Amino acid sequence: MITFDTRPDLYRHWKLTFGGPLATLSMDVQEDGGLSPDYKLKLNSYDLGVDIELADALQRIRFEHPEVHAVVVTSLKERIFCAGANIMMLRGSSHGWKVNFCKFTNETRLAIEDASDHSGIKFLAALNGICAGGGYELALACDEIFLVDDGNSAVSLPEAPLLGVLPGTGGLTRVVDKRRVRRDLADFFSTLVEGIKGKRAVEWRLVDQVFPTSQFKDAVAKRARELAAVSDRPSTGPGITLNPLNPTVSEAEVQYSAVAVTLHRDKRTADLTIQAPTGPQPATPAEILQAGDQFWPLRAFRELDDALLRLRVNEPEIGTIVIRTEGDRDAVLAIDRTLVEHQADWLVREIILFMKRTLKRLDLTSRSFFAFIEQGSAFAGSLFELALAADRSYMFHDDAEENVIALSPMNGGLLPMSNGLSRLQTRFLDDPDRVACALSHDGPINAGEAEELGLVTFAPDEIDWDDEVRLAVEARAAFSPDAMTGLEANLRFAGPETMETKIFGRLTAWQNWIFQRPNAVGEKGALKVYGQQGRPEFDWKRT
Amino acid sequence: MITFDTRPDLYRHWKLTFGGPLATLSMDVQEDGGLSPDYKLKLNSYDLGVDIELADALQRIRFEHPEVHAVVVTSLKERIFCAGANIMMLRGSSHGWKVNFCKFTNETRLAIEDASDHSGIKFLAALNGICAGGGYELALACDEIFLVDDGNSAVSLPEAPLLGVLPGTGGLTRVVDKRRVRRDLADFFSTLVEGIKGKRAVEWRLVDQVFPTSQFKDAVAKRARELAAVSDRPSTGPGITLNPLNPTVSEAEVQYSAVAVTLHRDKRTADLTIQAPTGPQPATPAEILQAGDQFWPLRAFRELDDALLRLRVNEPEIGTIVIRTEGDRDAVLAIDRTLVEHQADWLVREIILFMKRTLKRLDLTSRSFFAFIEQGSAFAGSLFELALAADRSYMFHDDAEENVIALSPMNGGLLPMSNGLSRLQTRFLDDPDRVACALSHDGPINAGEAEELGLVTFAPDEIDWDDEVRLAVEARAAFSPDAMTGLEANLRFAGPETMETKIFGRLTAWQNWIFQRPNAVGEKGALKVYGQQGRPEFDWKRT
């Protein structure tokens, strides 16, 4: 079973060092440290385990080191920055594993850009050697790219010419949409095994600057200090410590403090339940800092994030997930008020951004989500985002009208989707006024009102509830899982596309297609024969 | 060999009738009239042949009937509007055929929307019976949808629940992005085999209005007249006649009047050459009307369009296409001036819109395009769009600097891509000023200048030319065709996404993925067992 818990002293592949406002993330992949013994992680190539450490390091820089204002991403290997995703690992992986591996690496790269855009942490890729494929995709996620000009070091995306697949971690999209490399130059570059180096790499906008070896370190240090200087993060700590989540894991359950997952493997469904906070809650930045990772929104969303990741990689056959909430609705709304009031505080900001990224993780998880809003639920404010993120929501329409939901300012734009809109905006594309109308609704909203406002999909009454929700889940779990994946990937992202949604929509969808074509993964496919004797044999038919 | 030539008196599946400002397009598919005898086109289900007639009818309404201001799309079958794409046809088709079939039907639906947005022709779908799958997707392409309320007629997208695939002609995208159906309602609707009818279909925005059978015809006629009343098309004809193209087809060549395709099947490449106009050209709307379909831009782009379609469906192994132009550059520029000057004229407008759609067809053709700009070429103005559309362009840098290109106002936005930008804007996303700079360049541009302005990819000189272009084509033709398809689908569409690009990018890419998953097309896949005994068997793993 794959888990996503780690911490710096356990890292095998990265070194995270600190110096004043700068952190340095140095890749030094241990060849024998892969998740499977079937491959060796040569030349700083990576597998999911390497990326789990990277994702952890980014979280710790955000939360544990507020004094860090810029991060240098580099390598400890001579003349090698990173050779990209490990090809032997890809070759030996199932289709689903490849897809989920790419999804996680994409989310991690986007978290770098999120930190740059919203957290006041800038990233400088210091390419001290060969930077190929996924290595260059990591660099592309940074704000700036410096490349050593030693006559040898180049950036490249050799996936298409060498392996018959695409760069799977946003490379093509970021080249033309983020760095705005001219599309014909990008075409040439992306078919070039050896890559591009030196001045031409700068002229084509593939990197920002190149320096001879003798000047490289100083130039990187100088620029990193400049990038750090513009941050609005605190100049000193303390941060908070992210302690291990330590869920109780049994055959059919993963139980955290505020989140529980119960698996029904025979039905291919799961129940995912989130508990509202209990007891007194911190209300000021000082109290929140003191509560640290035990502050409910951070704790609950860390647990939710971990639960989603475990479901993705460990439970591929669980296709339909029912989301419930329980507990004190007003306690959630109180926390939302605290978050909104203190959103300018660095830690509160980080907590809100993490909630946002977790909800995006849910949007991008290829499982069907139904929210069941029942008596005693706590679908209020930020927890109501779970119902908005779900493919459908069912709200029990009790005669007494005691079953209610509630909105808060947290539904108003602080937790946007990848498309740049809030979930309410995406829901009411037909009439933006309905967003304002819903947000202005003061106090609890019963099932009839919720249906009227368009906030829930269905509101069956006592007579219908049991049958209707049972049949809905059974029907969902019986459909083709691929068709549901495609359906959800289209319907969840109504409205505008962004670089982020293009990466998951256009690029990933094409990559997934290619990842199962015989030209890539057949006996004589390019991914299969790479590094073996002989050349790939292609079915030349174009589609 | 599939051809795309037809005309109304040859139609087997559609009746096109005219009455003043209204045309009526009535579907009446002949069961035995499919392109293959292996399936019967029951219940107004369709194959590529049916859609070729529809595409032809739309062209003729535009060009031959300027007096038509609105079109009613309906069916001559009792209680059946259209059952969608024929499932037996899909089941028996290769992956590549399915993909190209969907691509063409998508382009045809988008041509309906193009006519509505830009030609002053509005479309009213009059659903006189069951409207399922591709039938509803056709309705979604119309401006408004009227549905008969007879207790039986419903709209539906049953592909996912019934066949384990997606609606492949833009259905999911148009439901949420065009009609702005709420995403959770769209989710429910798209998993419902029986569809939605009556008032609920209106409330959910799936159709615009419903009428009892007794009032349906009158309501349709009334609304069609209202839609026609807002048109800026001429109130009377004449239009022009679109005569057959009648190319000379031999084993390795398709030769039109201004376009020639030469196939090199052993190398998996083709040469596509477009001739500039010769002799005196019409310069006024009256002269253009008189020249009719022999007016060079219409003639040349009709031939180009036909050539691209033939390559798509008849020559799947031709993966790399070299585009050349020949002839009098100034004659092209003179035509461009005429088009721009008279763009408000209905016929000139139609010609420009058709050029636009043809260039989009090229953008969406999954073959690699290289433009070779050599001595005697005519890459000027609208023909230079071909070089901008190509994945790369190579311009021969002659010592005498006589090899030149030229821009015209036609490069300035009259021929936008699916992403809503001109090809120059897409090219210079990094710096919009460079678009203006290029457009302001007066007169011919030699190879050195073209490279400087960023208008061509490479400009090899006499010493390098032969080897460089030969090696480029050979290398391209040796890469995995799937990887090139995915690469091009990403790099060609830098910049914003639109509903149109979402259909081809997000929706189509996912559909292509699903179209080769065993859950759809394996022995026990949903598409394979539909209508047979037994139920599909799924691999339940989610990705």
Image: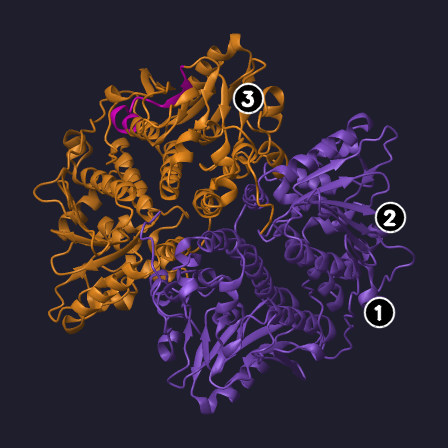
Chain colours: A orange, B purple
**Local SS, label 3:** loop
| Amino acid under disc 1 | Ala
The answer to the question of whether label 3 and label 1 lie on touching residues, with beta carbons closer than 8 A, is no
The answer to whether residue B439 is visible is yes
Q: Position of residue B8 (x, y in %)?
A: 70, 77
Of all residues, the one furthest to the left in this rendering is: A279
Chain at tag 1? B
Choose the circle earlier in sequence order: 1 or 2.
1
Q: CA distance from mark 3 to mark 2?
A: 42 Å
| Amino acid under disc 2 | Gly
Q: Residue at x 59, y 19 (%)?
A: A198
Residue A65 counted in the magenta span: yes
Q: Which residue is mark 3?
A: A154
Residues packed near mark 2 inside 10 Å, few (<14), some (14 to 19) or many (20 plus): some
Residues packed near mark 3 inside 10 Å, few (<14), some (14 to 19) or many (20 plus): many
Q: Position of residue B54 (x, y in %)?
A: 62, 71
Q: Which residue is mark 2?
A: B327
What span is colored magenta in the figure?
A60-76
Chain at tag 2? B
The answer to whether residue B460 is visible is no
Q: Position of residue B284 (x, y in %)?
A: 84, 64
Q: CA distance from mark 3 to mark 1?
A: 59 Å
Residues packed near mark 1 inside 10 Å, few (<14), some (14 to 19) or many (20 plus): few
Q: B243 or B331: nearer the eye?
A: B243
Q: Quadrant of residue A439?
A: bottom left
Relative placement, left or right, of A79 versus A298 is right
Q: Residue at x 32, y 16 (%)?
A: A17
Q: Which residue is mark 1?
A: B286
Question: Is residue A248 depicted above or below B363 in this figure?
Answer: above
Q: Position of residue A373 (x, y in %)?
A: 19, 59
